[in-house]
Amino acid sequence: MDKLKDKKISAFELTNLIMKSPVEYQRVSNNIWKLVAQNILKTDLENEKVTMKSIVEINNGSN
């Protein structure tokens, strides 16, 4: 989570920072959205489309 400290980056960029090989893309991206669902990460869910280009950030208690 240090890669996200005080930053807003796209889910795609975060996935690329975490992955060690392209084979891990699906698993890593799914886990990012799992963290969003658990309110550990947040994104603008009010957008009509949430994609890998959506900005994600650490949820510091604000929704």
Image (cartoon, rainbow, N blue to C red):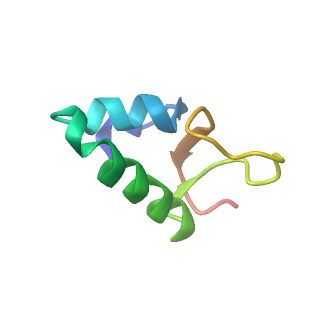
At 81% from the left and 46% from the top, the residue drawn is: 47
Front residue of 29 and 23: 23
**Which residue is located at x 46 percent, y 33 percent?**
12
- In the visual, does 57 lie left or right of 46? left
Quadrant showing the C terminus: bottom right
Q: Is residue 61 above or below residue 6?
A: below
For residue 4, side relative to residue 49 (left or right): left
Residue 15, percent from left and from top: 36, 37
Residue 52 lies in quadrant:
top right
In the rendered image, residue 50, in percent from the top left (x then y), is placed at 69, 46
Tell me how many marks there are: 0
Residue reaching furthest front?
A: 23
Q: Residue at the location (43% across, 28% down)?
A: 13
Q: Is residue 31 above or below residue 15?
A: below
Q: Position of residue 33 (x, y in %)?
A: 50, 57
Please name whichever residue, 57 or 60, is drawn nearer the observer in this view of the structure. Answer: 57
- Is residue 15 toward the left or the right of residue 34 in the image? left
Residue at 74% in and 54% down = 45
Spot the residue most to the bottom: 38
Could you tell me residue 19's position as x and y percent?
23, 37
Q: Is residue 50 above or below residue 55?
A: below
